[in-house]
Each structure stands twice: as structure tokens, then as C-alpha cells.
Image (cartoon, grey):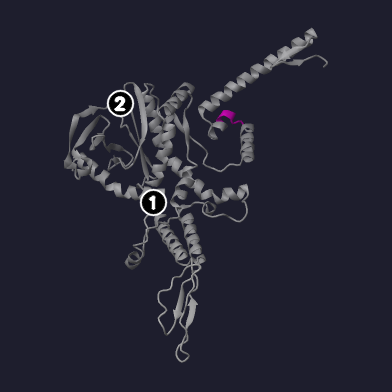
Amino acid sequence: MTDLERAYAALAGKQATYDQLWNYYDGTQPLIYSATRLREIFRNINAHFAENWCAVVVDAMLDRIHLDGFTVTGDTRATMALSSLYESTELHLDSFDAHLAALVTGEAFVIAWKEAEQVTAYYNDPMLCHAFYDADNPRLLKWAAKWWVGDDERRYLTLYYPDRLEYYVSRGKASDTSAASAFVAADPPTAPNPFTVLPVFHLRRERRAVRSELTNVIEPQNAINKLFADMMIAAEFGAMRQRWIISQADPGDQQNAPNVNWWIPAGDGVGQASQVGQFEQTDLDNYLKAMEQLANTIAVVSRTPKHYFAQQGGDPSGEALITMEAPLIKKCERFVEVITPTWTAIGAFLMQLAGQPIERFAIVPQFADVRTVQPLTQSRIRQADVATGIPLVTELRREGWSEADLAQLAKDRENEQTTQADLGGALLAAFDRNAPVTVGAGAQLKQGG
């Protein structure tokens, strides 16, 4: 099988699965019936009901994972240059989309390149890209593929290698492309890769396999949606009590509606007397309890704190909140640990594209703290760490301060020291001359006053 054929099979094969995963995250989830007969009974009901907990599971992690930037160990100038590239390429915005895709589908892609002396880097939808690893060394990314539909409605496909790029295009419209044989070499068919580095970077949720964060959530989510739909249907049909009539005469079709009177024929006094009754209302609480139990199941299997799904009795203390969120924090830390090497490689390649190559091991991606930290607790931890000899700048960097923030802090400190020195000098001069001194915006200090 050629690389073109492998690329086509991989890209075409993931479309349906990834479409489904994104639909579950977005809340456009199908209603799943446990029996064909039920599907036939409810086929004429057009309303759609869904209680979307998939988004909660993903967003609980996404809200805690934020790449603030990069630090180059021992090189402030390189740190500022890499931070500038991170923002100029808008990766500081695309990183959010990349992390979201990695959680929903299990993978995401970033492609970097240099065009007309301009360094570019951007997130790519995993539905459009695929990575191929060495069979003997699963850490070695050998080549990658990307396809997309152009303005001319034809499908374009690029194969990326460390030494070259190969370009293909479909003969006809993308909608008519159903096999690798539908592609031909584009013009030009190839281009050299002068950087000898694969410009496609693969962010994965886990290394063992491409696996979505929603894998264990979809089935209980389907059950919740089914119960929710049943409850809404029961509520609609039970909005007005269903009534029944027993009579020897035909009462005709009676309309069951507010302010409508029923005229019921009387019995003949010998046979069955006329009777009227009504059916009991449906207890919706049974549905609510079952849905709540399934939501708890989702919380357990996804390691998402239960207070994300339902209001808890009372407000938990700070320590209790830390304990409740411990499984989620561990999961977020593990995710950051897995994607850190890829972001390190991206940072190194950006510097190479900018003509400032540096060693990969010197680059440290700076992620915001995934933990829930109370402000008072954080200040006490900071004070204790600084007291033990850890530099304040190092402590602030651990807390997620960017290099720009740290540079501004250093500048503010320098200005403050200069202002204090000027004020001290002015006060001494005033006391020497026994004269009033103007400090700041018109304020006066006068000896003895």
C-alpha cells in the first residue's frame, strides 16, 4: 500500500467517529432507543431533548489547562523572542482549540512553517490530519498527512516528510472522491523541506491510543437523553388528566380540554350505570431520580467532581473542595504532562524557523496551575517558599505568571526604587535647607509641619 493510499484510508476512516464525538460535545446527540418497537412508536415525535453532560466533562478539564507561554532556561532574550512568536502566530489562542480537540477526539495537530520570511503556526482539526508513527519506535513520527476542500470544491492532500512535501489533488469534486485513486499529483508535485524537521506536531490525550475523554461517557449520556425524552413526553401527555367513560349509550367523541362540558347519557337503571373516571398522573420524580443516578455514574467514570453535575448541600470548605477535586486535578496534570513534550518541540521549531535555533531541553512550556488554590493559601505558600530561599520570580513563574508579567514586575520594582531614592534624597535636602519640599503631584513636605 502506498503512502497516499494509507493517508486516504486513515483520513476517510476517522470522519464518522469524530463527527459523532463533536456532536456529543456540542449537544446535538441522537436519541437512542433500547428496542426497535419503541423507535417505531415515537417516530412521529419531532421534538429533541438532551441534557448534555459531555460538555461538562470536557470543559471541567479545559478550564484548567492553559498554556501561558514558554521559558528558555538561562536565556532571557530567547525567552522574550519565543514568547513573541507564541503571540504573533496566535498560538496563544489556538492552543485552546488544540486542547479542546485533544480532549474531545483524543488528538489535535499544530502545523508550523515559514512563508515569505513570515513564521506561521496554527491549529488543525484532527478530522483533516493524521500522523503515522514508526512501527518499531512508537515515539518516532515518520510522516503525516492533511487534506482539505479548496474553493474550487476539489479535495487537496499533502503528505509531510522530514525532507520533502508531496502535493495531490482530486480529479473531480471532493464529494465525488471515494478512493485514493481519485487523486493525482498537483503542480508542483513536491517541494523540499529545508528545515529537515517534520512540521506537523501531534498532540495526544494519551500515548497508548487515540482515545476521547468521552469514551466512557457516551453510553450513560444516551440513557439520560432517553429518560429525559420520556419524561417530557409523559409531562406533555399528562398536562391534562386522561378521562374515561363507561355507558350503555354511545357518548360520542368527547374533547378533553379546559372549560369543555361533557354530556353523558344516563343508564337505564337495569344494566351498567354510567361512570366517569380519570387515569392517575405520571410521577415525573422517578425520571428525575434515574437521571440523577446516571449523572453520578458519569461523574464517577470520568473522575469529574459531583458538584459539577448537581448542587451540593451547603458550601464546601477550601480543604473539602481540594479533596473533592483531587481526581480531576490528577487527570489534568497527567494531560499536561503528556502534551508538554509536543509543545516543547513546537517551541523549538518556531525558534528554528525564526533563525534562532536553541536546544529543545532548554525550552519549558509554562502552563497555568491546574489546582484550585485559595488566594490566602496561595499567598502563604508563596511567603513560605520565598522564606526558604526560592526566588520570588521562580515562585511567580510556577504560579503561571508570563514572562511579560515578570518583566513588568521588574520594571515596576526598578521605578519604585528610583522613586524612593528620589524621595529620600529630597527629604534630606529639605532638612538640610530647612525648607519645604515638593514631592509628586504638588504634595509638600515641610520640616516640622
- Which of pointers 1 and 2 lies earlier in the amino acid sequence? 1
Residue 28: mark: 1
Residue 266 percent location from the top left of the image: 47, 84
Q: CA distance from mark 1 to mark 2?
A: 43 Å
Question: The disc labelled 1 sits on which kind of residue?
Answer: Thr
Tag 2 secondary structure: loop
Q: Is residue 162 above or below residue 34?
A: above
Q: Which residue is mark 2?
A: 195
Q: Label 1 crowding class (10 Å Cα cut-off): few <14, some 14-19, many 20+?
A: some
Q: Is residue 239 located in the magenta-colored stretch of the structure?
A: no
In this view, the residue in front, 105 or 392, is 105
Q: What's under tag 2, amino acid-wise?
A: Phe
Q: Residue furthest toward the top?
A: 433
Image coordinates of residue 376 in percent, x first then y, are 64, 39
Seen in the picture, residue 63 relative to 348 is either above or below; the reply is below
Residue 37 falls in which quadrant of the image? Answer: bottom left
Looking at the picture, does residue 320 appear above or below residue 194?
A: below
User: x, y (%) of residue 262?
Assistant: 47, 75
Tell me the magenta residue range.
389-394
Relative to 216, is 274 above or below?
A: below
Q: What secondary structure is found at the residue carrying circle 1?
A: loop
